[in-house]
Every structure is written in structure tokens, then in C-alpha cells.
Amino acid sequence: MRYIKGSVVITAQGDIPLLRLVRNCRFVSHEQLYELLRHEAVVSSRSSFNWRMQRLMKSGRLDRLTGFWFDGSSVYTINQNGLAELESQVNFPLLCIREHDKCRTASRRFMRSS
């Protein structure tokens, strides 16, 4: 299947587990994320993991925290676009309100279904 050049197709097998893991961790280093995804058998190749991370950052779904390192590794967090992507996949994301640094654990879909 061919896609339009420059488009990003989010896959349920690779991208969604990665986004979900970053969401659940809130902050996670590059190395920690790779090891966790390898343990869950989501990734097996370091190069494909690095490619996936670059894709998700360039498409505006993950943020690399500037000035923060953990054991010599970059630190990542999910942003509003990544949360919206998970919500569109019905993964009930953890919605963070950055202004107040408070977290809410219910999504709008969950609230409507109650």
C-alpha cells in the first residue's frame, strides 16, 4: 500500500503501544522506552525503534525535553496531539492540564458513557 509522501500513518501494532507507554510513564528516557518495548515484544530492532521515535516527534505526537537527560539518554513525554491520537484509537488517555499541573484520569468518552 502506498501513502502520500510526508504523511504519517499511525499503526496499531507499533505506534499505539509506544504512545500508550509514554503516556503511562509521563516521562521516560530513550533507553528505558526501548527496553520496555523490547520486553513487550513490540520492537526488536534498535534502528526501527529510533525511526519510529523520529516519526512520532516530527509528526508532533511526542516531545523531547530539552535540557533533561537520564543516564545519558534523552527524555520524552507525550503531548496533546499524542493524547488525541490515543483517544481517537479509544485508549482512554490520561489527560494532563499543564497550567495547573494536575492530572485527570477520565477522558471525555468515558465521562459520556457513564
Image (cartoon, helix red, strand yellow):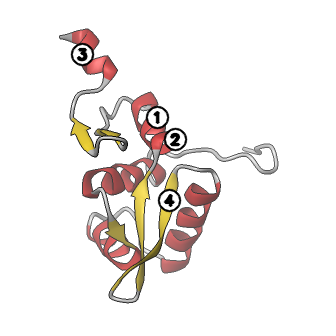
In the image, residue 72 lies at what x, y percent?
A: 40, 89
For the residue carrying disc 2, how many other residues have a C-alpha within 10 Å: few (<14), some (14-19), or many (20+)?
A: few
Residue occupying the point 59% across, 69% down = 51
Compared across the picture, whether 2 is left or right of 44 comes to right
Kindly identify which numbered label has been placed on residue 15: none
- Asked if disc 3 and disc 2 are in contact, CB closer than 8 Å, the reply is no
Residue occupying the point 24% across, 40% down = 103
**Which of the 4 quarters of the picture holds residue 33?**
bottom left
**Residue in front for this viewpoint, 22 or 67:** 67
Q: Residue furthest bottom?
A: 72
In the image, residue 65 lies at what x, y percent?
A: 46, 67
Kindly identify which numbered label has been placed on residue 81: 2
Q: CA distance from mark 4 to mark 3?
A: 27 Å
- Asked if disc 2 and disc 4 are in contact, CB closer than 8 Å, the reply is no
Mark with earlier residue (3, 1): 1
Q: Secondary structure at mark 2?
A: helix
For the residue carrying disc 4, how many other residues have a C-alpha within 10 Å: few (<14), some (14-19), or many (20+)?
A: some
The residue carrying mark 3 is 111
The residue carrying mark 4 is 63
The residue carrying mark 1 is 84
